[in-house]
Amino acid sequence: MTTNELFCKSWDAPYKHGEKYKGSYGFWCDSDTLVLSFQQTVQKEDWGENFKCTTVETEAFGNVHKGFYEQFSEIYPLIETELQSYSGLYKRLIVEGWSQGAVLAFMFYEASLVDATCVLYGMPNFLKSKKDAKKWKRKDAIEIRNNCDIFTRLAPWQTKPETQVQSFDTFNLIDAITKIEEKHTSYIYYNGGEI
């Protein structure tokens, strides 16, 4: 499966939502691969969490975006329990997410330390400082980034952990602002190769 095939298939994942903070995740299978997808912003509650841009100090992640952390904390135990129910039923695990979902996917990947491939699309900033980014152990996540996707630059006063970045497109402020949706969904067309 290529990076753009994974991105397209994740749109139809059977997403479940947290009760209070509405973080979304879903498991689905592709042959002998189990995929854990984290959904992008889709509900009005998601937008509320996106705009909680202050950070909270956590032991595992350092100072992290409050809204994303609330969503992650609510759904993490549910995901761990459900993942155990798939034990022995797959040969490979992929953890992936887009936008808000990319942050949740990366938090899960870091916290669980599962043997998986982690693929992140259009991930926004979510850590207070470079000092917090250095606390992250996992440095092998694949981050697919459109350089003209404005959401990958938000919040500009925050940062993100080190990843294996695959970037495409050239930054153009006018395109970034006037073609927001086109640039944020452009991952459909970028083939970063087999995962």
Image (spheres, rainbow, N blue to C red):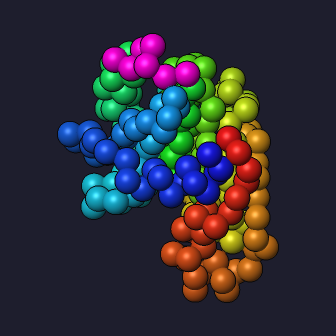
Question: Residue at point 44% right, 44% down?
Answer: 38
Residue at position x 62%, y 46% in the image: 1
Q: Is residue 86 magenta?
A: yes
Give percent across and percent down for residue 182. 56, 77
- Which residue is painted at 58% across and 82% down in the image? 179
Q: Is residue 72 left or right of residue 147?
A: left
Residue 36 quadrant: top left
Q: Quadrant of residue 92?
A: top right
Q: Position of residue 154 (x, y in %)?
A: 59, 60
Q: Magenta stretch? A: 85-91
Horizontally, residue 190 falls left or right of residue 180, namely right
Give the side of residue 186 with respect to residue 56, left or right.
Answer: right
State which quarter of the image contains the C terminus: top right
| Along the viewing direction, whichever of 91 and 46 lies nearer the viewer | 91
Q: Quick check: 127 left or right of 142?
A: left
Q: Nearer the viewer, residue 24 or 161?
A: 24
Would residue 9 be counted in the magenta stretch?
no
Can you say whether 36 is above or below 67 in the image? above
Compared to 77, does 125 lie above or below? below
